[in-house]
Image (cartoon, grey):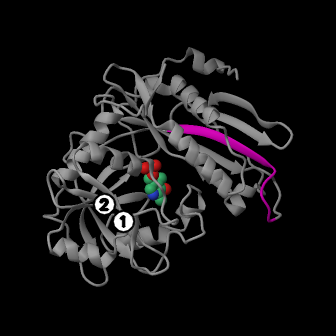
C-alpha cells in the first residue's frame, strides 16, 4: 500500500519530548484504515493526529465492540528505534477481533501500520533510556445503527504517546488490595482478550483499592474466588526461594486472565537466567502462607505499560501482610533489568523479538 504524508508532517522537524506526561504526550500522527464487506480493509493512511467525527449511534460507543493493543518502541544503543514483539501483538489483536465478531486485521498490515507511525514520529523519542513510545492500535464497530448485532463497518487506527519511566529513581513497591466483591472476567467471557469493556468494569474495584490506601487491585478467579488471577491490567509473578534456582511462578492461563506478551517474555528470560519458570494456580491462602513461611520471597506484576512492578504489601479482609521486607527483591530487579536490556538491544535477542524501524 502507498501512503502519502500530509504537507504538515513533511515540513516539520519534530523535537524529542523531554518530559513525557502520563499518557497524554501524544505523538503528531495517526494511522487510519476502514473495513466494509465489499472492499475489505481499504483507505489506509497516515495523517496528523485529529479528532474523530462519530455519529451518536456508532455501535462501538453503545455496545463496546471495541478492541485495542498496547506495545512499545524503544531507542536502541546505536540510536535506532525498535518495537518489541509486534507480531505477537498482531496475533493477539486477531484473537480479540475474532472474540468480538470483528474482521481480523492481517498480521503484516498491523505491523506495517506500526512501522509507518513510528517512521513519522520516532523523532519525538529522546535518547533518555527511560522513555519509550507507547503505541495504541484500536478497532471499533463503526455502523450508525442501534440494532443489537455486530457492525458491518469498522475503523482501525493506531495512535501513540511518549511514555516516561522509572530509571534513575529507586524502584518502589506497590501495595495491593484484594477484591472479594468484583470479578474482572469470567470463564467463557472476554477476559482473555483485550477489549474495551473489560476495563470499564474494573474501575470501581480500582477505586476501592485506592480508598483502602493501595495502588492496585488484585483479581481472584470469579468462580471459586480462591485463585489469584491478575493485578489491575497486569500479570502476576511469585518468586519462590532466592538466587539461582529460584522458581518464577505465574498463574496458569485460566481462560479469564489475559495472556500478556510481557508474561511470556519473562517466562522465557527466567529460564536463561537460571531460574525455574512455572505456570501454576496460586491461591490467595497459599500466597499468604508461603510469604509467612518465607517460601515466597518476592512478588511482581508485568505488562507493557508498567514493565516489571514489584509488590510490597497486601491488604486483605482477612489480614494484611508484607512480602519479604517490603522492598523490591533481587530476583525482581534482575528480571526487570534483563527485560529492559532486551528492549534496548543491549542484550542478545536470539528469538528476534526486536523489530527495527528503518
Ligand atoms: C494488556 C494486559 C496485560 C499485560 O499484557 P502485555 O502484553 O504484557 O502488555 C495483563 N493483563 C491485562 C488485563 C491486560 O489488559
Horizontally, residue 101 falls left or right of residue 262, namely: right
Vertical placement of 318 versus 3: above or below? below
Determine whether the residue tagged by mark 1 lies in a helix, strand or loop: loop
Q: Is residue 273 left or right of residue 215?
A: left
35 left or right of 12 in image: right
- Residue 108, image x, y percentages: 62, 32
Q: Position of residue 260 (x, y in %)?
A: 45, 52
Taking depth in this image into account, of 37 and 208 the one nearest to the observer is 37
Mark 1 highlights which residue?
A: 280
Residue 358 percent coordinates (x, y)? 49, 19
Q: Residue furthest bottom?
A: 318
- Left or right of 219 in this view: 339: left
Q: Which mark is residue 257?
A: none
Is 157 within the magenta? yes
Query: Could you say whether the residue bearing mark 2 is in a helix, strand or loop?
Result: strand
CB of mark 1 within 8 Å of CB of mark 2? Answer: yes
Q: Is residue 80 magenta?
A: no
Main SS of the magenta part reads strand
User: Which residue is rendered at x = 76% and y = 54% of the image?
Assistant: 58
Q: Quadrant of the N terminus?
A: top right
In the image, the segment drawn in magenta is 148-160
Q: Which mark is residue 249?
A: 2
Amino acid at each position: 500500500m502507498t501512503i502519502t504524508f500530509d504537507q504538515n508532517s513533511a515540513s516539520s522537524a519534530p523535537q524529542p519530548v523531554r518530559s513525557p506526561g502520563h499518557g497524554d504526550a501524544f505523538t503528531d500522527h495517526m494511522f487510519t484504515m476502514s473495513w466494509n464487506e465489499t472492499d475489505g480493509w481499504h483507505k489506509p493512511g497516515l495523517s496528523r493526529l485529529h479528532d474523530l467525527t462519530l455519529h451518536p449511534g456508532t455501535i462501538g460507543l453503545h455496545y463496546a465492540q471495541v478492541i485495542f493493543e498496547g506495545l512499545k518502541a524503544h531507542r536502541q544503543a546505536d540510536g535506532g528505534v525498535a518495537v518489541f514483539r509486534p507480531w505477537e501483538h498482531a496475533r493477539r489483536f486477531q484473537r480479540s477481533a475474532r472474540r468480538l465478531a470483528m474482521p481480523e486485521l492481517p498480521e503484516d498490515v498491523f505491523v506495517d501500520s506500526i512501522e509507518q507511525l513510528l517512521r513519522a514520529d520516532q523523532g519525538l523519542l529522546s535518547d533518555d533510556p527511560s522513555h519509550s513510545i507507547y503505541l495504541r492500535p484500536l478497532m471499533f464497530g463503526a455502523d450508525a445503527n442501534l440494532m443489537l448485532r455486530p457492525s458491518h463497518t469498522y475503523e482501525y487506527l493506531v495512535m501513540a504517546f511518549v511514555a516516561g519511566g522509572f530509571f534513575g529513581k529507586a524502584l518502589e513497591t506497590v501495595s495491593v488490595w484484594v477484591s472479594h466483591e468484583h470479578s474482572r472476567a469470567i470463564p467463557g467471557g472476554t477476559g482473555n482478550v483485550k477489549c474495551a469493556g473489560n476495563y470499564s468494569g474494573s474501575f470501581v474495584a480500582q477505586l476501592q483499592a485506592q480508598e483502602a490506601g493501595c495502588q492496585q487491585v488484585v483479581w481472584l478467579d470469579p468462580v471459586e474466588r480462591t485463585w489469584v488471577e491478575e493485578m489491575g491490567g497486569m500479570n502476576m509473578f511469585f518468586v519462590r526461594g532466592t538466587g539461582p534456582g529460584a522458581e518464577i511462578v505465574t498463574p496458569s492461563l485460566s481462560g479469564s486472565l489475559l495472556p500478556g506478551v510481557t508474561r511470556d517474555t519473562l517466562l522465557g528470560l527466567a529460564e536463561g537466567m537460571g531460574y525455574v519458570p512455572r505456570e501454576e494456580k496460586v491461591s490467595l491462602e497459599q500466597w499468604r502462607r508461603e510469604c509467612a513461611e518465607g517460601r515466597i520471597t518476592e512478588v511482581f506484576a508485568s505488562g507493557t505499560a508498567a514493565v516489571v512492578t514489584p509488590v510490597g504489601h497486601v491488604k486483605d479482609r482477612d489480614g494484611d501482610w508484607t512480602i519479604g521486607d517490603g522492598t523490591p527483591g533481587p530476583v525482581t530487579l534482575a528480571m526487570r533489568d534483563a527485560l529492559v536490556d532486551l528492549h534496548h538491544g543491549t542484550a542478545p535477542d536470539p528469538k528476534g523479538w526486536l523489530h527495527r524501524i528503518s
